[in-house]
Amino acid sequence: MLLDYSREQLKEKIVGLGFPVFRANQLFDALQSAKKIKEITNLPKSLLEKIEDDYPSFEIIKKLSADDGTIKYVFKLNDGNTIESVLLHYKYGNTICVSTQVGCRMGCKFCASSLNGLIRNLSCGEILEQVLYVNKDQGGDTKKRAITNVVLMGMGEPLDNYENVSQFLKLVSNEDGINISQRNITLSTCGIVPYIYKLADDGFAVTLTISLHAVTDEKRKEFMPIAKTYKISEIIEACKYYFNKTKRRISFEYSLISGKNDSNKDADDLVKLLKGLPCHVNVIALNNVPERKLMGVPVNKAYAFVDRLVKGGLSATKRRTMGENIGGACGQLRASLKSEGE
């Protein structure tokens, strides 16, 4: 897909097709502006015919708006599968939560994204396309962006699709394109340890967020299969390495699950685990996924849990729940298989 290319790579391709370099620049600008191929009026028909099969044909098939202003976008991909992205409005700007896979194979017991398993990885261009299309839909362009922040927290495990995700990070932060600083990008992972090290070694400076949700390996295994492969202690060591390389504070996600990880002892153990590590804890009230049987906790208990963390010396806040009534909150995004969408 043409959005997988940087400007320089696109130049090579277009010149190889027998067209001058300036046509590649025109095409690159059209791609970054999320133009449909039929909307491109400054390129010759002969070139458009040659690139038609490689031109992205994303389609927004549904937009759902929540009372809090959150918008969930449902995109139909070139192959007929669908993914979901979420636009969140904050005082400091607009954040888009993007998906990195169609489905997910991590199998976390509180998440809707893995209900159908992993269908396939998204290409770097398909991840980027979510940002560009929503930016355009919100009235932005590459010069005056409507999107200020990106979080890789949608469907899929970003580090399970490392090559495409790492290329996406280069494309979305490149000054040639939409140019969103890596300091305004957050990547959330359940903890694939080798790729946390690789992310640091490859020179990225995004905010790393760890989906932790438990303080012991045994408890974590109950609802996060990844815990059978990587211990919490290994994840913490990788986080220390990432911080030392990037000087970026680590974030930890902690969804409160009734009767599983919500006790005072859990809070105290979390303090012991993370104290001394430059980090912030986002405490999440578990969002409803009908197919899952896990239950969340009352709001007052979530705030009490946060208060105990803060008194223990951690930086912690309760994450504001946004978009839950449209299935757009944490853990609620899901894929539709091609056969289901036809």
Image (spheres, rainbow, N blue to C red):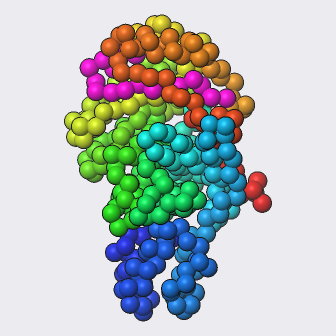
Horizontal and vertical percent position of residue 208: 37, 38
Q: Is residue 212 visible?
A: no
Q: Nearer the viewer, residue 275 or 234?
A: 275
At x 54%, y 42%, the residue is 88
Residue 295 location, quadrant? top right
Residue stretch in magenta = 270-288
Horizontal and vertical percent position of residue 49: 58, 87
Q: Please say if 325 is above or below 96.
A: above
**Residue 323 appears left or right of 191:** right
Q: Please say if 112 is above or below 277.
A: below
Q: Please say if 11 is above or below 212.
A: below
At x 76%, y 53%, the residue is 340
Q: Please say if 13 is above or below 307.
A: below
Horizontal and vertical percent position of residue 9: 37, 74
Residue 312 location, quadrant? top left
At x 43%, y 74%, the residue is 28
| Quarter of the image where the C terminus is located | bottom right
Q: Is residue 21 magenta?
A: no
Q: Is residue 286 magenta?
A: yes
Q: Nearer the viewer, residue 148 or 57?
A: 148
Q: Is residue 106 visible?
A: yes
Horizontal and vertical percent position of residue 16: 40, 87
At x 49%, y 46%, the residue is 94
Question: How many numbered marks, from 0 up?
Answer: 0
Residue found at the very far left of the displayed protein: 244
